[in-house]
Amino acid sequence: MSSHNPTLLILTLLPLVGSLAVFSLRDAQAKLAKQLSLAVSLVVVVYTLVVLFSFDTGGKRFQFVGSWTWIKSFGVHIAFGADGIALVLVAMSVLLVPAVILASWNTFDSRSGAEEAVTSTTRRRSVKNYFGLILLLEFFMIGVFTAMDVFLFYVFFEAMLVPMYFIIGSFGGPRRQYAAMKFFLYSLLGGLLMLASVIGLYVTSSAKTFSIGELIAHPLPDDNTQRWLFLGFFIAFAIKAPLVPFHTWLPDAGAEAPAGGAALLVGVLDKVGTFGFLRYCLPLFPAASKYFAMPILILSVIGILYAAFLAIGQRDMKRLVAYTSVAHFGFIGLGIFAFTTQGGTGAVLYMVNHGFSTGALFIVVGLLIARGKSRNVDDYGGAAKVTPILAGLFLITGLSALALPGLSTFVSEFLVLVGTFTRYKGLAILATTGIILAAIYVLYLYQRTFQGRVSEKVAKFRDLNAREIFAVAPLLAIIVFLGVYPKPVLDVINPAVKATLSDVHKQDPQPQYGTSATGGKK
């Protein structure tokens, strides 16, 4: 690659510069740290929107490509570029960050904060470090989606563990150290498998480079080597996503992380896994992807049903939301490995919609916990009579989690199921039952927390203030808009999904006209 377009390099570096500026402040300058973090995040949003609207849906697959030699002897480059899939995920990520900053504005100022209230220690947390870590995490999130060099991607993939580890371990709930260590060890194991596969890919490929474009153009032979390398990448991404049975770290991490950290963990970081399926597993290992498709599809359906049943039985609100995400990632996996345009497009749109939906849900749950000082569902009840705005926002985010028609998640879930049904009817039918289970756990959660008799504790709650409303309202507006008019995002996603399916040499199944149920001609 010889292009030196700095567009995405600048986008990637903006939050890094902001985080370094925040870290350089004194602990006493907490208010300035918040203001600076919010300002930087909004600048990144504006810059990203400019890039997004500059994207040519009818142009090249990868655009804004910029490459600079890093390690010449091994063909390693600092290379950035984006297709439609990467670009919409970057946009989703950067839009979540200011919402998280606003929602976390006063969380760690005093012992009255939501997460401070349920922790087991009295030591004071550094407010400026929290917001600095959020911006540092944003730097890694943008980098991991836009990296066009496999080695550079691996660096971002591993490095993004560090800020999230400290967000969970330093600012989380009572069992934060356990959750942070479990998250780190699981992710590190996946990273080591990926590192071995990255090295194996370089050694076995005739391209002798880490450039994703060159590697796609020089596919590996269809043999056991390709399958082993695929498994190394797949397991690393399945842990990150996570897919069943690699999911056990997420409920602990999601429950113990501060609400803002949980929103980014489940809303963005976990999408790196499903993004990796599309960007690396399918194009680099097309034969192996088709070989392992059926076991992965079965695991996806199991994950949808298994996680939904576990969510129904949860009493911890944040663990419940975490389990719903495991179920949703099953739908995404189903859409990707169905190898249909509708399924793949639905899966990518599901990643975007899930980021907004679950991110908003974690934020709203965090706002409720800030008032009740407990994550236990049984400690609430009747809150809708006291906090009607909070109840309304909670209901809308909950309905988006169960894919109510008219909200964005319905469109993506419908596309995934239709795309899967055209090739695997039985699996699509089984997966559809997950929608019924989703309605049970979401509505049951809302009923137990916001309906019923108002307890003495709940009667003292205050409703949301302007800052808290403004943190969630833009996310809900996006959810409603994409539920009514998803075409702008689909137009960006579709060409990239078709190009990915072309890499795997898969085409949509052709409808059979003029045949009877038994296969004979009418």
Image (spheres, helix red, strand yellow):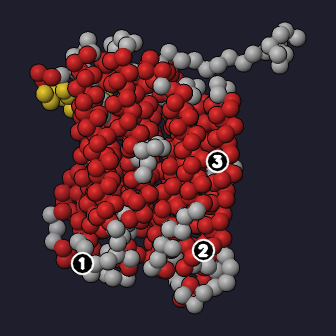
The alpha-carbon separation of the residues under discs 3 and 2 comes to: 23 Å
Q: State if disc 3 and disc 1 touch (CB < 8 Å).
A: no
The alpha-carbon separation of the residues under discs 1 and 3 comes to: 42 Å
- The kind of residue tagged 2 is Thr
- The kind of residue tagged 1 is Arg
Q: Residue at x 60, y 47 (%)?
A: 305
Q: Residue at x 45, y 35 (%)?
A: 85
Label 3 SS: helix
- The kind of residue tagged 3 is Gly
Label 1 SS: loop
Residue 415 shown left or right of residue 73 in the figure: right
Q: How far across and down, in percent of the image, does residue 144 sit?
A: 32, 40
Task: Bin the neighbour count of mark 3 within 10 Å (Cα to Cα): few under 14, some 14-19, many 20 and up.
Answer: many
The residue labelled by disc 2 is 449
The residue labelled by disc 3 is 434
Between label 3 and label 2, give the one nearer the viewer.
Answer: 3
